[in-house]
Image (cartoon, rainbow, N blue to C red):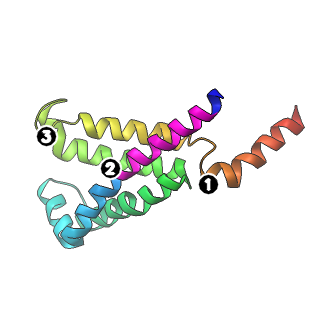
C-alpha cells in the first residue's frame, strides 16, 4: 500500500515541478525568442539566442515530457542546466530568500533532478523501460 502512495506522490511532484517550468517556458514563448534572447544578453548569458531556444524547449517540451514521465533523467538534467543559468545570471545577487532570491530556482533544480532519476511507476519511463528492467533483475536473482 505504501508503494502506491509513493508512486502517487512522485507523480504529483512531477506534475508540480513540470507545471512551474511550463509556466516559465510559456512566458518566454510569449516574449518570443528575440525578446528572451535580448533579456538573456542583458543578464550576461553567453550565446543568448541559442540559450533562449534551449530554455524555451526545456521549459515547454521538457515540462510536458516530465509530467507524463518520459525521458525524465534527461529532462531533469535540462531543468538543472536552465535553473543554474537563472540562478547565476539573475538570482544570485539577491540572496537565497526575499525579492528575487534563488530559493525557488534551487528547489526546482534539485526537485527536477531527484524526480528525474526516480519518476515512479506512474510514468511512461516505467511503463516502457522499468518493467523490462524489473523482469531482468528477477531473472538474474
Q: Residue 48: say if magenta.
A: no
Q: Residue 9: say if magenta.
A: yes
The residue at the point 18 percent across, 59 percent down is 40
Which image quarter holds the N terminus? top right
**Mark 3 element type:** loop
Q: Which mark is residue 20?
A: 2
The answer to whether mark 2 and mark 1 are in CB contact below 8 A is no
Q: Nearer the viewer, residue 95 or 50?
A: 95
* Residue receiving disc 3: 100
**Quarter-wise, where is residue 119 in the image?**
top right
The residue at the point 33 percent across, 35 percent down is 107
Q: Is residue 47 visible?
A: no
The answer to whether residue 99 is left or right of residue 29 is left
The answer to whether mark 3 and mark 2 are in CB contact below 8 A is no
Q: Is residue 65 visible?
A: yes
Q: CA distance from mark 3 to mark 2?
A: 16 Å
Q: Position of residue 64 (x, y in %)?
A: 45, 59
The answer to whether residue 81 is left or right of residue 113 is left
Q: Nearer the viewer, residue 34 or 120?
A: 120
Q: Position of residue 24 (x, y in %)?
A: 27, 56
Vertical placement of residue 73 versus 106, above or below:
below
Look at the image and give the residue range highlighted in magenta: 4-20
The answer to whether residue 131 is left or right of residue 88 is right
* Residue receiving disc 1: 124
Q: Nearer the viewer, residue 118 or 120?
A: 120
Amino acid at each position: 500500500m505504501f508503494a502506491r502512495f509513493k508512486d502517487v506522490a512522485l507523480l504529483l511532484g512531477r506534475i508540480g515541478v513540470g507545471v512551474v517550468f511550463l509556466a516559465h517556458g510559456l512566458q518566454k514563448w510569449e516574449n518570443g525568442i528575440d525578446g528572451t534572447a535580448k533579456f538573456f544578453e542583458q543578464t550576461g548569458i553567453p550565446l543568448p539566442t541559442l540559450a533562449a531556444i534551449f530554455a524555451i524547449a526545456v521549459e515547454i517540451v521538457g515540462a510536458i515530457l516530465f509530467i507524463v514521465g518520459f525521458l525524465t533523467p534527461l529532462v531533469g538534467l535540462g531543468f538543472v542546466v536552465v535553473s543554474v543559468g537563472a540562478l547565476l545570471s539573475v538570482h544570485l545577487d539577491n540572496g537565497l530568500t526575499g525579492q528575487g532570491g534563488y530559493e525557488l530556482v534551487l528547489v526546482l533544480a534539485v526537485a527536477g533532478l531527484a524526480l528525474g532519476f526516480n519518476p515512479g511507476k506512474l510514468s511512461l519511463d516505467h511503463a516502457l523501460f522499468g518493467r523490462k528492467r524489473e523482469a531482468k533483475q528477477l531473472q538474474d536473482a
